[in-house]
Amino acid sequence: MGTAAAEEAAERRREQRGWYVYDWACSVYSTSVLTVFLGPYLTTVAEAAADADGFVHPLGIPVRAGSFFAYSVSLSVIVAVLVMPLVGAAADRSGRKKPLLAAAAYTGAAATACMFLLDGDRYLLGGALLIVANAAQSVAMMLYNSYLPQIAPPEERDAVSSRGWAFGYAAGALVLVANLVLYLAHDSFGVSETTAVRICLAAAGLWWGAFTLVPLRRLRDRRSSPGERATAPGFRQLAATVRDMRRHPLTLAFLLAYLVYNDGIQTVISQASIYGSKELGLGQSTLIGAVLLVQVLAVAGALLMGRLARTYGTKRTILGSLVAWTVTLAAGYFLPAGAPVWFFVLASGIGLVLGGSQALSRSLFSHLVPPGKEAEYFSAYEVSDRGTSWLGPLLFGLTYQLTGSYRDAIISLVAFFALGFVLLARVPVRQAISDAGNPVPARI
């Protein structure tokens, strides 16, 4: 019995190590593509295609060039919302997550690699590739996250989830260093500045695809029970997922709180580089350096907040991080233009709370999922994760569309953190875990 338990623990550790590597693989997309390069670059491409009034006209709809990126991010979540519940239910009922994870990951990686073709005034191509890559990443991350309750017992999940985020931020920092070298020394490499940006975008896709091979070798499929029904088609499955979640109202209450505050987090991540470049007048090298600082501090922040959660409880630690987000974002509104030092100070504040708030939210939600519903429930969770939130980018884009001010757009996001704090504070998480049919940890 002791030998069997030791072998089971060793196999679990092997899967956990493979699971970490997927964060290492795909986080480069989130940092290099979504956070640093694509927003300012796609906005510049859209500006090159804009009319005299600064508008582009996709499908005949007038859109400010400065809002096109935010709208594209928002549209990508609509695609993800339609696809993820179908894939999640199929994964739970068939038990075959790995083939679905591979298909989603390599679709996203291919779309990202094709961003090398984005030049001139091809803003529509950029928007289409962004929508495909972001939606594919959402599906892949939903499947990846759904492994957490299967590879880690309740007492290990905060630590395992935090290590996964730390791996992701470490990879993001490593690749950003390489990006910074290429961007600053592009003349030495014999390429133009725009070509260097396109290489950085494409390299993120190649990195994503290459390292995805490791979790595909390490993670195991869990077969479903015989006689389970096939996945319902189309919107019937989406409706069925929502109906099932209504049977667990406290889980749904947490998901609502997470959706609200994570909308703010993801919008800050995806729009910060545009704010820095267009409103504060900072150069690309300054933005890369700031995001690199975020990546380094986020590794330490994720691990530190994992420890704080063990001392003070996961929920209380997340609430503390939301207070820090609110203060940091409000300070961002008053940043003076052309002052990179203060931008780095703001980046430091973001880095310290970014990884931990996301890692602990994922860990807490894993306790609230009924057994056997992991992928299906994480499909709903993933709607508001990793840059696929739609309310935040939509509000940011609309605010800029109406006011022409990025400062007004950034301060509008404070509402997401304040409301998310209130909603999360009202969720009795111990009762929610018990109602979901899971063991309640000693401290949560």
Image (spheres, rainbow, N blue to C red):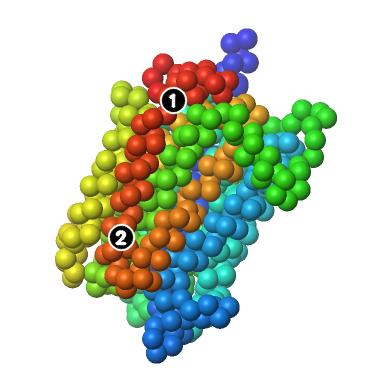
Q: Quadrant of the C terminus?
A: top left
Residue under pointer 1: 429
**At label 2, which amino acid type do we have?**
Ile
SS class of the residue under badge 1? helix
Q: Is residue 331 above or below residue 181?
A: above
Q: Is residue 428 visible?
A: yes
Tell me the residue at 59%/54% (across/down).
80
Name the N-terminal-most of marks 1 and 2: 2
**Residue 51 appears at what percent x and percent y?**
43, 88
Pick the front one: 391 or 5: 391
Give the quadrant of residue 32: bottom left
Residue at 57% x, 43% y is 380
Residue 148 vs 88, above or below: the answer is: above
Residue annotated with mark 2: 410
Say which of 76 and 394 sits in front. Answer: 394
Q: Residue at x 38, y 71 (%)?
A: 401
Tell me if 183 is positioned left or right of 91 in this view.
left
Question: Counting other residues with Cα less than 10 Å from the Cα at mark 2, is it few (<14), some (14-19), or many (20 or more)?
Answer: many
Residue at the image position 27 percent from the left and 47 percent from the top: 326
